[in-house]
Image (cartoon, grey):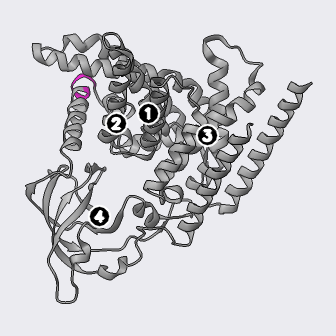
Amino acid sequence: MPQNSWKFYTFIGLFILIVAVADIFDFLPFQNKNSDEFSGEVLTFKAVVAGEPEDREWNTRLTIEILEAAPTETTDTPALISTKILVTTDRHKNIVYGDVLSVTGKLEVPENFLSETGREFDYVGFLEAKGITYRMSNPRLEVIGHDPPSKVVESLLGFKHFFTDRLDYALSEPQSSLAAGILIDGKQSIDATLQEEFKRAGIVHIVVLSGSNVTIIAETIFKIFSLFLPRLAGIGAASFGIILFALATGGAAPVVRASIMALVALLCRSAFRQYSAARALFITAVVMLCINPQILLHDPSFQLSFLATFSVIFMVPLFQSLFNFLPERFGFRDLVAATTITQFFLLPLLIYMTGTVSLVALPVNFIVLPFIPIAMLLSFVTACLSFVSGFFGTSLLALPAAFVAHIVLSYILGVAHISASLSASEIAVGGVHGFFIILSYVAIFWWAWRRKKRGEGEQKI
């Protein structure tokens, strides 16, 4: 590795270490240190719905931001202005992004809780990473106006809902929910039962919006616009599409990570410079941590997305030769190698987070992952044709694509259902200590270092 690369990665490593230590010892800016001040107070205030409502099986969760708060006999409330609160309310309330609400309820400070495996989940840190200070359960809510924080986000959410409605029109359930999940809506689109099946089968990541979605969108937009526009215009259109997609999906950490990396790649393409995925990954991490340092330790989606991408860039090339005995036909060897190595690399963190191990995850990923791009393409075509069909008052135009999409989506759902129903599909290992993570990754990196040194030695010979 060149000397300047060592300097670059050393700087990045020190930066990440400093952020982690500052977070552990509460030195980070913007951390909530006085949230107990209003805990237990029953307040009346005006707030705006600052994020897309999240519908659960039995309730709806709203992220609201306080605009005005009436003082009480014991507290002065100006400090609450701009505070974000997680509200749990009835699922059937018709509340959307940008609604201005009159809220009356009791503020509660979030508390950590024990998961089913006995591990304490850092719920406080998880919400703080999202900028949320308090929570409220079933307050009195009244819609008194509509003033969205961002007209652009509101328009994008409207388009997303229209798009998912077109999928609902053309496909039956649960195929339409899965199609929406892998395209634009993530886990929010599928119900709790289906999420649990995907989790037990080890393929819940296919409905977590990630880099593959962003990559497909960027390449598709670039190729389409490059047909009738100059190269730079196509790159600009792709960049604009990436930004809109990230906003429409709520800016989840995996999407933001992939979006920044894709924008860097497009920038390099426009400047005719060589793109380094490794450098782009770490530059992206620095940018995201500068914006919100708390995601490093408190956002599981950021951790998994970063490590998965790190594995693909660094670990897969080092260990790919172990799979040389497999046939290359149809990209089978590359698929098995990348899937196996990535799953192995993420396993310690997944065990720490969930306290479980999916025994079927590896084979299920082998037989499902090749069909995900096909399902995405067919679902997108189905939604577009369903939209065009609306002008003609018939669904026949979308029927062929919907029929094939239904078959592919049903295959994925069937594999997940059968795999999850196996008695030994998942085993519980209980809560593990944080040192398990450290020792596991020290061992993995030591093994990787040994293989790298051995490879360099063989090249010299």
Circle 1 sits on which residue? Answer: 263
Circle 4 sits on which residue? Answer: 84
Pointer 1 with pointer 4, Cβ within 8 A: no
Residue 318, percent from left and from top: 74, 32
Q: Earlier in the sequence, mark 1 or mark 3?
A: 1
Pointer 2 with pointer 3, Cβ within 8 A: no
Give the CA separation, mark 1 to mark 3.
18 Å
Give the CA separation, mark 2 to mark 1.
9 Å
Question: Helix or strand or loop: what does disc 4 sit on?
Answer: strand
Looking at this rendering, what residue extends furthest in the bottom direction?
Answer: 74
Quarter-wise, where is residue 18 in the image?
Answer: bottom right
Specify the principal SS of the magenta part.
helix
Give the CA separation, mark 2 to mark 3.
23 Å
Q: Earlier in the sequence, mark 2 or mark 1?
A: 2
Residue 82, percent from left and from top: 25, 66
Circle 2 sits on which residue? Answer: 243
The three-letter amino acid code for the residue at tag 3 is Phe
Pointer 2 with pointer 1, Cβ within 8 A: yes
Q: Residues within 10 Å of mark 1 (few under 14, many from 20)?
A: many
Q: Where 50 sits versus 420, above or below?
A: below
The three-letter amino acid code for the residue at tag 4 is Lys
**Along the line of sight, the residue nearer the viewer: 429 or 266:** 266
Q: Residues within 10 Å of mark 3 (few under 14, many from 20)?
A: some
Q: Nearer the viewer, mark 2 or mark 4?
A: 2
Question: Helix or strand or loop: what does disc 3 sit on?
Answer: helix
Q: Earlier in the sequence, mark 2 or mark 4?
A: 4
Circle 3 sits on which residue? Answer: 310
